[in-house]
Image (cartoon, helix red, strand yellow):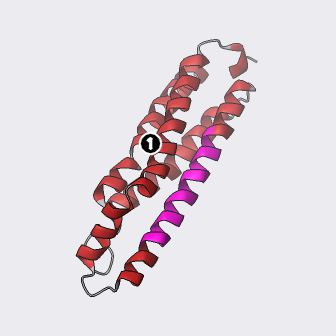
Amino acid sequence: MTTLKQRPRNRSALTTMYVGAGLTAIASLFPFLDQAALADHIRAGYAAYEPAAIDAAVAAYLAILATVGGLGLLGWLGVMWAVRAGKSWASWLAAGLLAIAACFAVAALTIRDTSGDVGLAPLLSWLQVLPCLAGLAAVALLWRRAG
């Protein structure tokens, strides 16, 4: 039985995973750098909100995005470890985590809040898609190698 570790072509999959981890970090950190865009989005949907309520909503979104980003980075690290260790189930883990990430990205893009607008500012929602693209490429590479 050949393990993934014995296949030197996994370097391209690992490189793609490093890119995905970097994109996850960017998608997680960007909202902290541009909190005004998130606050403006919330203010546009809820004009009657007091500044304290807007600040609380921004803090909640930042906490959610940071948590999801941290979990995403753990996922990338776990899959990278599994690939480097030659685990035969690494491609299944990668595919499962991609499915979870894609569900989150689609939810970020489409779920509407009570104002009728999407809950998360569109730029921040689209940033959640970028790591999924790298994940899709990594999963494709891993499945091609596993087959």
Q: What span is in magenta?
A: 58-76
Could you tell me the amino acid type at mark 1?
A: Cys
Instruction: Look at 58% across and 25% down and name the residue there.
Output: 14
Q: Is residue 89 at all visible to an observer of this figure?
A: yes
Instruction: Look at 31% across and 81% down and name the residue there.
Output: 114
Residue extending farthest top = 8
Query: In this picture, is 73 found above or below 64?
Result: above
Q: Which residue is mark 1?
A: 132
Q: Quadrant of residue 107?
A: bottom left
Q: How many marks?
A: 1
Q: Is residue 56 left or right of residue 122?
A: right
Is 66 within the magenta? yes
Residue 87 in percent (x, y) is at 73, 29
Residue 63 in percent (x, y) is at 53, 65
Q: Is residue 52 left or right of residue 68?
A: left
- How crowded pointer 1 is (Cα within 10 Å; few <14, some 14-19, many 20+) is rated as many
Residue 2 in percent (x, y) is at 73, 17
Residue 101 in percent (x, y) is at 49, 50
